[in-house]
Image (spheres, rainbow, N blue to C red):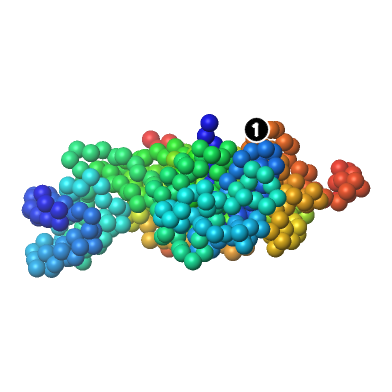
């Protein structure tokens, strides 16, 4: 009964991979799954900060692959959510500290104990990227609705195909429907047009100030019932578990605004 | 024939160059230049048929060899590769092909993603899109049965009669032979029909694509 290894990647930096990993992971654990988050961004670790476990790190992924400590001992239990564990990256080493074979065997080991192994991939397409995808079975591509991010995502889809990771998922992050309506921002269909039909839309997350707050506090947004981004992440987790969840209506403004849009008085 | 070796033979119809280029194209071209400069004038004005023992040589490599020959007044007429190999297309980055004869076409039955490149001496037909960041380089024509949003270079060996056709022609950059063109900086409205790009004088012009009249 082994779990699924999913890598979350993007190519472009700063589009929300770590936020996606932290939030989907937490949401899956809240649904009763056993989840381990693996930070593969060695040298620039962030996952521990975003999830609020940075001062509990004793051992990291490099200690594990170099054989200094058992994997079990390096895993950190989440302080709030049952069933959620973190394997942090090293901050003092760099991407050359592990190789693809080591990542593959680490992932095989972890999937025996967990339902989901989520790997936070570093930005770029060099050694760090290849390490992160080495042990993965599925990929989630994160992209913001911007041409630069979309260009990189397209490139990464091609690289994933070359590596045998076909049919990746897509999470569109930080969308602003007011800008989309004005024509100032790419629409989700613009993005799926370029990326092609093999890429399956997993979720659309609105741009939300609560993410900044939750990152700084180390409390994933899914734990905040008022956060719209958090709601989107909870839906994404449900979809991964096979549930059919409708995409959130991101056109805000309340009842009157919706009526006005309906009759064509507003965009 | 060992790697890096080259042999010139004179025939009634011109010169035959038999060579095994190997992985180091630049090294081979340098040695070719040295060899040619020793006998400059002797070969001048002839046409050269090149027969390579390699299975594949990139379009860029052939261009370098053609330029080296041109410096000594030699015209590269035709090329053949491989011991009886026919065209097989390789379209992941780093892999490139050459056809035994000009005028051959390859069919790419998928969309080319950013960072992917097709490199072929004949015509290239893509049954899909060419995404921004992808490149198609052809000795002949480039035909995209989809949206051309990346880079296309037709007539890469210098054939100014080559064309680029696409259902939706909106490339980042267009090249035919040695002409280079890009879309104007102001946003252009999508014409919504297939278009063809061809050389006209020093520039590249784009017209609506219409089925050519049959010539009798």
**The residue positioned farthest toward the right in the image shown:** A256
Q: Nearer the viewer, residue A56 or A126?
A: A56
Write down the quadrant of residue B68 in the picture: bottom left
| Residue B76 visible to the viewer | yes
Q: Nearer the viewer, residue B127 or A46?
A: A46
Residue plotted at (92% across, 48% down): A256
- The percent position of residue A243, horizontal first and vertical second, equals 69, 33
Residue plotted at (63% across, 46% down): A84
Side of B56 relative to A122 (left or right): left
Q: Nearer the viewer, residue A256 or B57?
A: A256
Q: Nearer the viewer, residue A247 or A190?
A: A247
Residue plotted at (76% across, 43% down): A248
In the rendered view, would you say B178 is above or below B94?
Answer: below
Side of A256 relative to B11 (left or right): right
| Residue B207 visible to the viewer | no
Side of A230 relative to A109 (left or right): right
Callout 1: SS: loop
Badge 1: residue crowd in 10 Å (few <14, some 14–19, many ≥20): few
Write down the quadrant of residue A46 in the picture: bottom right
Chain containing the residue with disc 1: A
- The percent position of residue A237, horizontal first and vertical second, equals 67, 41
Write down the quadrant of residue A195 in the picture: top right
Residue plotted at (26% across, 60% down): B64
Q: Which residue is mark 1?
A: A242
- The percent position of residue B77, horizontal first and vertical second, equals 21, 52
């Amino acid at each position: 009964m082994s779990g699924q290894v999913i890598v979350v990647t993007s190519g472009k930096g700063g589009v929300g991979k770590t936020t996606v990993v932290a939030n989907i992971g937490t949401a899956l654990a809240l649904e009763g799954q056993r989840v381990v988050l693996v930070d593969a961004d060695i040298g620039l670790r962030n996952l521990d900060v975003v999830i609020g476990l940075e001062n509990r790190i004793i051992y990291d992924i490099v200690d594990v692959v170099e054989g200094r400590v058992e994997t079990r001992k390096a895993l950190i239990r989440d302080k709030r959510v049952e069933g959620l564990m973190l394997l942090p990256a090293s901050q003092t080493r760099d991407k050359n500290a592990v190789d693809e074979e080591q990542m593959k065997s680490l992932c095989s080991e972890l999937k025996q104990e967990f339902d989901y192994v989520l790997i936070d991939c570093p930005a770029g397409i060099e050694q760090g990227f290849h390490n992160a995808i080495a042990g993965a079975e599925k990929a989630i591509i994160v992209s913001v609705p911007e041409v630069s991010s979309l260009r990189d995502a397209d490139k990464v889809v091609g690289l994933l195909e070359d590596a045998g990771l076909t049919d990746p998922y897509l999470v569109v992050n930080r969308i602003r429907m007011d800008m989309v309506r004005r024509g100032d921002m790419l629409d989700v269909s613009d993005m799926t047009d370029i990326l092609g039909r093999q890429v399956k839309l997993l979720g659309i997350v609105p741009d939300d100030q609560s993410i900044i707050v939750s990152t700084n506090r180390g409390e994933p947004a899914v734990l905040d019932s008022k956060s719209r981004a958090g709601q989107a992440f909870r839906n994404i987790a449900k979809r991964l578990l096979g549930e059919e969840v409708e995409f959130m209506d991101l056109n805000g403004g309340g009842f009157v605004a919706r009526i006005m849009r309906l009759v064509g008085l507003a965009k | 024939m060992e790697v890096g070796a080259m042999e010139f033979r004179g025939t009634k119809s011109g010169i035959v160059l038999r060579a095994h280029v190997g992985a180091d194209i630049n090294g081979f071209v340098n040695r070719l230049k040295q060899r040619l400069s020793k006998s400059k004038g002797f070969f001048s004005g002839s046409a050269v048929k090149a027969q390579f023992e390699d299975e594949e040589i990139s379009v860029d490599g052939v261009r370098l060899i053609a330029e080296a020959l041109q410096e000594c007044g030699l015209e590269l007429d035709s090329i053949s590769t491989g011991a009886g190999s026919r065209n097989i297309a390789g379209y992941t980055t780093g892999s490139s092909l050459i056809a035994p004869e000009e005028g051959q076409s390859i069919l790419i039955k998928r969309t080319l993603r950013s960072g992917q490149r097709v490199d072929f001496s004949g015509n290239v037909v893509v049954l899909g899109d060419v995404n921004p960041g992808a490149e198609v380089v052809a000795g002949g024509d480039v035909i995209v049965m989809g949206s051309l949003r990346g880079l296309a270079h037709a007539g890469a060996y210098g054939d100014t009669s080559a064309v680029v056709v696409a259902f939706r022609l909106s490339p980042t950059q267009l090249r035919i032979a040695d002409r280079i063109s890009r879309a104007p900086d102001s946003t252009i409205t999508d014409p919504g029909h297939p278009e063809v790009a061809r050389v006209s004088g020093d520039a590249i012009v784009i017209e609506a694509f219409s089925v050519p009249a049959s010539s009798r």
